[in-house]
Amino acid sequence: ALFWLLGKPLWDFRRAAAGQPPGRGASKAVLHGAAAAIVAVLVAGFFEHNLGDSELLEMFLTVIAVGYVAREM
């Protein structure tokens, strides 16, 4: 279940970034940044359990929400 919760946004952001027109763009940069934040939290989870902290969880959920907003633009 945890893989689905973290893997689905990563998959969605990758597909949305691939569907963007070639070149630079604000939404493409946000999508890549959101995917990088998800990967960073996954890598950090191998070394310590910090997703339970409210500050980190709030930031993580905000990044995912911003990624989905950029996906819709």
Image (cartoon, rainbow, N blue to C red):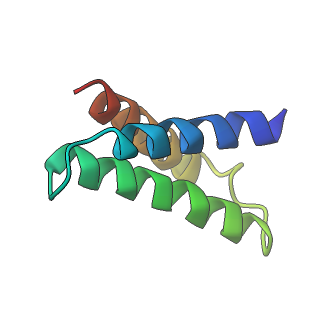
In the orientation shown, which residue stands out farthest toward the top? 72
Relative side of 26 to 18, left or right: left
Q: Position of residue 69 (x, y in %)?
A: 31, 29
| Residue situated furthest right in the rendering | 1
Quadrant containing the N terminus in the rendered view: top right
Report the residue at 71% width, 48% height from top. Answer: 52
The residue sitting at 30% across, 24% down in the picture is 72
Nearest to the observer: residue 53 or residue 16: 16
Instruction: Check the image and name the residue furthest to the bottom.
Output: 47
Compare residues 10 and 64 and report the one nearer the observer: 10
| Count of picture labels | 0
Q: Is residue 7 left or right of residue 11?
A: right
The percent coordinates of residue 15 (x first, y second) are 46, 39
Can you give x and y, in whole percent of width and height, for residue 41 in the image?
A: 62, 60
Residue 7 shown left or right of residue 65 in the figure = right
In the displayed image of the protein, which residue is found farthest to the front? Answer: 22
Q: Give the residue at x 28% y 35%.
A: 70
| 56, above or below 3, in the image | below
Q: Looking at the image, which residue is at 68% across and 60% down?
A: 42
Please tell me whether residue 45 is drawn above or below residue 11 in the rendered image: below
In which quadrant will I find the C terminus?
top left
Q: For residue 40, what is the image quadrant?
A: bottom right
| Residue 45, percent from left and from top | 75, 64
